[in-house]
Amino acid sequence: MNRVLTFLICIILSSAVTANAETALKPFNVQAKAVSSVANIDTVAKDNFIKSKYASAENRFIQSNVKASYDDFSELVDKADHDDYVFLLYGIKMAEYGMFDLSDKLIDRLDANHFTGAYVKDIRKYYYPSWIMNQEDIIVFADAYSNIIYNNMALETTSELLNSPKLPDCDYKNYLIALGYYKTNNLTNALKYINYAITQNSENINYLSLKAKILADSKKTSQALKIVKEIKKASFLTTDFQRKVRATEEYVLYKTSKNEALKDYHLAYYYHLQDKSLLAIKVLQSAILVSKQYSSDIYALLGRIYYENNDPIRAYEFASKSYKDNKRNYIAVLTLADVKYDQKNYTDSLSYYKKAKKLSNTTASQVGIAKSYFALSKPDKAKKIYEKLLKDNKTNEDLLVESLKIIPQRVDYYLPRVASIDLSNNNIWLGLANLAIKDGNYTMASTYLNNSYYIDENNFKYYYYLSLVLRAKGDIDSANRSLLSCADINADYKSVINSGYSEYYGN
C-alpha cells in the first residue's frame, strides 16, 4: 500500500476512535529529536529536556562527580512538567542512588491517585532509611555509593565512612559500610554492619537483601534462605520491586547451590530478572555443555528468556527440547502453551495450559486456559475461570488485562489498576488514552499519551491517538502530520486493529 493511499485511509478512519495495545523500562535514547516537522512539538521538547538532563546526571554520578550529578537531578526535579509517570520513574532511581530528598520532592508532587499509591509505598519500603538527612550528608553518602558501586573504591570509601565523625551514625551509613566491606569480600565486617543497619531500621528491604547476599557468600545457606523468606513476606505490589525480590532469591540460590550447572541456572535467572538477558543466555549456553542432569531446566529457562525477548522460534526450540527430556517441567510447558497461543493454535495452547495447571496451579496457567477457551468461542467457560480468579487476585497483570476481553465493563477499573503496578506497560497507557478520548477528556488523554511517548516514541498507535486529540482540538494540520507518522511506522495498522489487537480497550 503506498503512502498516499495509506494517509487517505488514516484521514477517513480518524473520525472514529479505534484501537491499540517489555515489562522492563528500555534504555533511554537521549539523542535530541528534531521538532520542526512533527505534530507533538511540545512533547518532543519536554522529552528531550528530561532525557538529556537525566543522561547528564547519570553519567556524572557513575563518574563520581556526585555534586554535579545532584545539581542535574535537582534541576530535572524543579523544571520537569507535572507527569506522574516521569516522577515515579526518576523517584525510583534517585532513591536507589540515596538522593532521598530529591526522591521525596518528586513523590510530593505526585497526584494522590490510583496510579501512584502502590509505587510510593514500594519505593519507601525498599529503599528509604529511617534517618532524615540534610542535603550535605545526602551528597556525601551518594558519593560513597557511587565510589563503591561504580569506581572500584570500596576499600577507601569504607575507611572514610568509618573515620568521618561528622557523619550521623544512622542506618544508611551502616548500610554503606556493610556494602563497602561486602564489595571487598570482608564478609565478617559486612555482616556486622548490615546487622547494625537492620537493628536501626528493620523495615528496609534493601538492607535485608544485602544481608541475604552476605550470608549466601559466607556459605550460611539456611540463614540466607531464612532472610529470603522474610523478604518475600514484604508483599510488593509493583512488578519492578517484585522482580528485585525475585532477583535476590535467585542470587542466594546461585551462591548456595552445590551443583555447578544448577548454580549457572540460578545465576542466569538472576541476570534475566535484572534485564541482562544476553548475559543469562551466555551462562545457560555454557551450562548446557557440562550438564545432562539439569539439561531440561536449562533448556526451559532458555526458552522462557527467548520468549520474553520476542524470539518465538528459539523459544519453541528450547522449550521443546526441555519437554522432550522432561514432560513435567512447568516452565517449558507454559512456554510451549504461550507460543502456540500466539500462533493462534488455540487447541494446542489449551492442551498445554491444562498440562501446566496440573504441574503448578498458577494464575498464569489458569489465565492461559481461560483465554484459550475464549479464542475457541467458549466465552462462558472463560468467564467462569476469570470471575473465580478475580475474587482472590486483583493484582495480577495478565489476569486483569485478559479478563477485560470478556468482562469489558470493568475496563475503567482494571486498566488504571494495571498501570498502578506496572508503569512501563505501554499498552495500558494507550488503552487509557483510548477511553479518555471516547469520554471527550482530551486533557487526560494527552497525559496518558505523554507517558506512552516517553516509553516508546515509535509506537504507531500513539500517533493515531494523538491525531484524534489534535483533531478534536481543531489542529487539523498537526493531526494530519501525526497520521502520516502513524502510516510511516505501520502502513497496515488498520488490519492489525481489525484483527482484535486491542479488543479489551472498549473498541
Image (cartoon, rainbow, N blue to C red):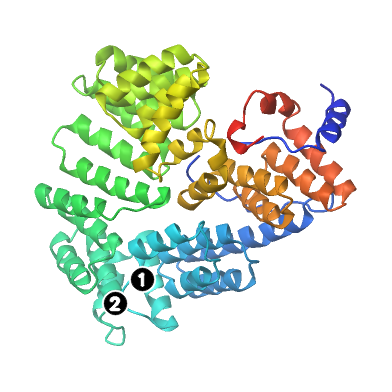
- How would you rate the neighbour count of disc 2 (Cα within 10 Å): few for under 14, some for 14-19, many for 20 or more? few
Image quarter hosting the N terminus: top right
Query: Mark 1 falls on what kind of element?
Result: helix
Q: Tell me how far mark 2 sits from mark 1, CA to CA.
A: 9 Å
Q: Amino acid at mark 2?
A: Glu
Query: Would residue 507 appear left or right of 415 to someone viewing this image?
Result: right
Q: Is residue 386 left or right of residue 253?
A: right
User: Residue at 39% of width from left, 24% of height from top?
Assistant: 335
Identify whether 296 is placed above or below 70: above
Q: Is residue 90 visible?
A: yes
What percent of the width, then of the height, locates residue 164? Answer: 28, 83
Residue 73 position by quadrant: bottom right
Left or right, 188 with respect to 29, comes to left
- Per the image, label 2 sits on a secondary structure element best described as helix
Which is nearer the eye, 127 or 84? 84
Residue sitting at x 77%, y 33%: 488
Towards the viewer: 230 or 164: 230
Q: Is residue 44 above or below residue 22?
A: below
Query: Residue 144 got which mark?
Result: 1
Residue appearing at x 45%, y 25% in the figure = 382
Q: Which mark is residue 160?
A: 2
Give amino acid for label 1: Ala
Point out the frontmost of discs 2 and 1: 1
- Tell me if label 2 and label 1 are in contact, CB under 8 Å: yes
